[in-house]
Structures are given as structure tokens and as C-alpha cells.
Amino acid sequence: MEDVRTAIREYTEMGDLEQKIRLGIGSAAAAAAIFAPLGYRGKGILTAIAAGAILSGIYRRSPVKRVLGL
């Protein structure tokens, strides 16, 4: 059973570079959502992008790789 878990972890886990990129994009989107003169819709979209990018970077799981099968 441990071999299956290890295979799944390697299949969906991201590398260090991808993690740094996701955290950077999430931080930039969060800063833009806070400081940009946008309406509620624009701030909501940027907040959703920031949350998704930051959480996927923290948990090191790539939903795009999982969906595309990479």
C-alpha cells in the first residue's frame, strides 16, 4: 500500500521551482486585490486566484498536473 501512496505523491507533487512560482503569483494577486482600484468583482477574482495559487503552493499539490495527467 505504501508503494501506491508514494506513486500518487510523486505523480501530483510539484517541484521547488513550481512552488516558488505559485507562491509568487499568489502573493502578487493578493497585493493587487488589496491595493488596486478595482470593483468588488475584480477584487473577488484576484482573491480567488491568490487563494488557489497560495494554497496549492503550500500543500505542494498541482491540480493542473492532476487534471492533465502530467
Image (spheres, helix red, strand yellow):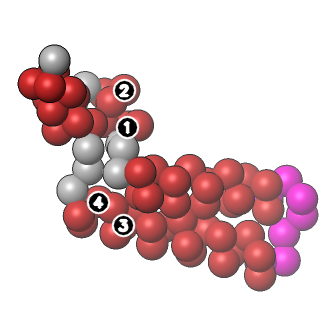
Q: Badge 4: few (under 14), some or many (20 or more) residues near its Cα, within 10 Å?
A: some
The residue identified by callout 1 is 64
| Mark 3 vs mark 1, CA separation in Å | 14 Å
Quadrant of the image for the C terminus?
top left
Quarter holding residue 16: bottom left
Image point 55% across, 73% down: which residue?
27
Where residue 28 appears, as percent x and y from the top left, is: 56, 74
The residue identified by callout 3 is 21
| Mark 1 vs mark 4, CA separation in Å | 12 Å
Where residue 13 appears, as percent x and y from the top left, is: 26, 44
Q: Badge 3: few (under 14), some or many (20 or more) residues near its Cα, within 10 Å?
A: some
Q: Badge 1: few (under 14), some or many (20 or more) residues near its Cα, within 10 Å?
A: few
| Mark 3 vs mark 4, CA separation in Å | 5 Å
Image point 77% across, 76% down: which residue?
34
Quarter holding residue 63: top left
Part of the protein shown in magenta: 36-42
